[in-house]
Amino acid sequence: MATQPLKLYQVGTFAVGNRLLSPDERTVQAGLERSNALTSGHRACQGCGEALGARYVLDAAMRATEGRLIAANATGCLEVFSTPYPESSWQLPWIHSLFANAPAVASGIAAALRVKGRSDIRVIGQGGDGGTMDIGFACLSGMFERGDDVLYVCYDNEAYMNTGVQRSSATPPAARTATTKPVGEEPGNVFGQGKSAPLIAMAHEIPYVATATVADLHDLEAKVERAMEVHGARYLHVFVPCPLGWGSAASDTIRIARLAKESGLFPVFEAEHGEVVNVSKIRRQVPVEEYLRPQKRFAHLFGDPPRTDVIAEIQAHADRNIRRFGLLDEGAED
Ligand SMILES: Cc1ncc(C[n+]2csc(CCOP(=O)(O)OP(=O)(O)O)c2C)c(N)n1
Ligand code: SF4
Ligand SMILES: [Mg+2]
């Protein structure tokens, strides 16, 4: 009799999944010895994907480096909500750079450690999509091209949230921001602009590039741990919903991140030296409408009459991602 491979899919949080795993496979957060790198006292909004993502990233990196880690942080929500003067929520050596130069500051720390012969201490640079993909982009490309021994993490909430939700080059088409208002026929942010930072990072042929979302925190931790096994320039791009800027419910952060992946709008993958080596498959493709509807930044698409033309364009974009990255799990059973 032919045997059918058994496929298990995680659909909720990892609280249950952890109990089913052996202790050494459980999440970093499930361990009592977690470092709590980003701890109490920060002032992130309720449901902030960036705060959640950063905590998982830093704790996983702390575990991977046995606590020998330094972080450089660009200006942005993550920096502002975590360090209201004179306090700090960070439980590791952490430096606030400028908005534009977190990758360069991280590179400098890595260079200083090399001169001191401290190869045991590792470095993370981090920032939002604006700090990473717009104003800090030259520093990031330089860091990649020189092969500096830094893991750079971009927390992508698709706009400049800290200063009041202005558009960035990561803002998706048709999204409403303070600087891309839907007026008349204009559907919010324009189509055909912006950039894919992970693909540009891959073009530098650095040893490791990965994307992740806060819907799959175990996957996020695993990618940080994998990145820390490698030396040289590495890049991790984390999709982090922002309830304030997106007009979504605080309780929907994880669901919206999952829908971004399951619709194909945010491909989740790993690449080594410029080649995709692993993709997180979509079991059942979700129409983009399911992802767009719970977010007020897309509310103008569902007025009377609805902008079916714009929604179709967004759907075409998701379908293109699915083809390009081979995201559909063809063998999945319902
Ligand atoms: C040179 C410079 N220009 C502008 C600013 C103002 N500023 C600070 S944070 C920020 C936006 C940050 O956006 P992003 O990097 O996406 O992080 P988020 O707040 O969304 O997490 C801006 C415009 C600044 N600090 N320095
Ligand atoms: S504005 Fe967005 S990114 Fe900033 S703290 Fe609030 S939810 Fe987080
Ligand atoms: Mg941002």
Image (cartoon, rainbow, N blue to C red):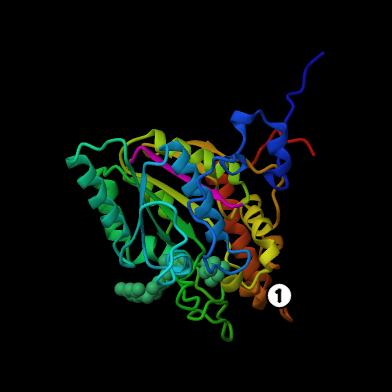
Instruction: Categorize mark 1 by other alpha carbons within 10 Å: few (<14), some (14-19), many (20+).
Output: some
Disc 1 target residue: 302
96 relative to 117, above or below: below
Can you say whether 67 is above or below 48 in the image?
Answer: above
Residue at x 27% of width, y 59% of height? 138
Residue 303: name its quadrant. Answer: bottom right
* Quarter of the view holding residue 205: top left
Asked if 5 appears above or below 256 in the picture, the reply is: above
Is disc 1's CB within 8 Å of ligand 2?
A: no
Residue 1 screen position, x and y as percent: 82, 13
Q: Does residue 60 appear left or right of residue 139 in this picture?
A: right
Q: Quadrant of residue 197?
A: bottom left
Is residue 172 among what the camera can see? no
Viewer-closest of 87 and 281:
87
**At x 70% / y 68%, what residue is drawn?**
293
x then y, percent, for residue 89: 47, 61
Please say whether residue 99 is visible from this viewpoint: yes
Magenta span: 206-214
Task: Residue type at mark 1: give it.
Answer: Phe
Judged from the image, the secondary structure of the residue bearing numbered disc 1 is: helix
Residue closest to the far right: 1
- In this view of the protein, which residue sits in the foreground, 239 or 150? 150
Residue 238 drawn at (x, y percent): 50, 53
Specify the farthest residue to the top: 1
The residue at 61%/74% (across/down) is 297
Residue shown at the point (45%, 35%) measured from the top left: 226
Majority secondary structure of magenta residues:
strand
Q: Residue 64's x, y, as percent? A: 44, 37
Quarter that holds the C terminus = top right
